[in-house]
Image: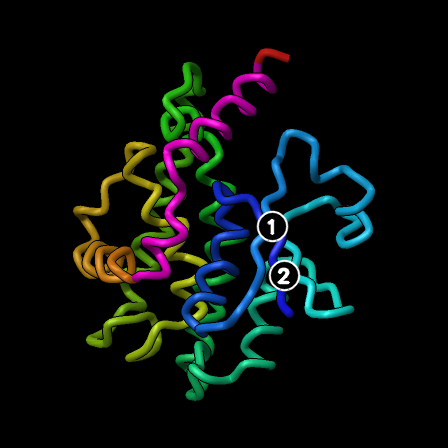
Amino acid sequence: MLTLYHAPISPNSRRVWVTLLEKGLEFELVEIKLDGEQFKPDFLAINPFHHIPALVDDDFNVVESLAILDYLEAKYRTPAMLPQEAQDVATVRMVQLVTVNELLPAMNPLMFQMLDLPGGDPDKIEQAQQKIATVLKFFEHLLDDRPFLGSDNITLAEAVAGTVIPWLPRGGVSLSDYPKLSAWCDRIMARPAWQTTNPTPEAIAAFKSIMSARMAG
């Protein structure tokens, strides 16, 4: 039995949750509240680095979201979420890694706007917007006449980038200059897996409360 330890507000968690749903797998969902539950001994026994998500498959623990996605793809090959052609595989991997290493860090200064919190450094926000624009232009170029990145079918690229990019308008970043990416975003957001995993207002409010407490402390 697969068990996913996750936090609903986390894009790292959500990319795994989406993949489990897209593959039609049976799994148990266990929420880890990020107000300290990640440091409790029971969870540290699963992931000593106290990060979410973590996947438990019987007696095998998998940590780090990209490793979890590879594990799921290798073990549950149907439906396939990784293309076969070399260039398409490279497209998926580039999107995954650019999202994790470039896009997500660049979004940090926009967190205040995304959560309607006071604050934010204008210079850092401007730098973030420039970096994000570079990423979005890159992704726009990668999209061809197929509906998904490197494929006619949903891939692991959508699971990673598609759980991050829809948040950008909340941070003041419009997708209007990227028509293919905007249409791609609308296409995946309409899918049941995205509808199911979309953070609820309650989850957003809980995370906002945690962030406010950290800022006050």
Estimate the x, y position of residue 1 in percent, counting from the top left.
Answer: 64, 70
Residue indicated by mark 2: 3
- 41 and 134: which is toward the camera: 41
Residue range in magenta is 192-215
Estimate the x, y position of residue 9 in percent, counting from the top left.
Answer: 48, 41
What's the residue type where badge 2 is placed?
Thr
Estimate the x, y position of residue 145 in percent, counting from the top left.
Answer: 20, 75
Magenta residues, dominant SS class: helix
Residue indicated by mark 1: 30
* Circle number at residue 15: none
Labels 1 and 2: the sequence-earlier one = 2
Estimate the x, y position of residue 216 in percent, counting from the top left.
Answer: 58, 11
What's the residue type where badge 1 is placed?
Val
Label 2 packing within 10 angstroms: few (<14), some (14-19), many (20+): some
Vertical relation: 117 (above or below) 192: above
Vertical relation: 158 (above or below) 114: below
Specify the quadrant that holds the C terminus.
Answer: top right
Vertical relation: 79 (above or below) 134: below
Q: Are marks 1 and 2 in contact (CB under 8 Å)?
A: yes
- 35 and 11: which is toward the camera: 35
Q: Residue at x 33, y 41 (%)?
A: 168
Tell me, yes or no, whether the highlighted magenta stretch contains residue 197. Answer: yes
At mark 1, the secondary structure is strand
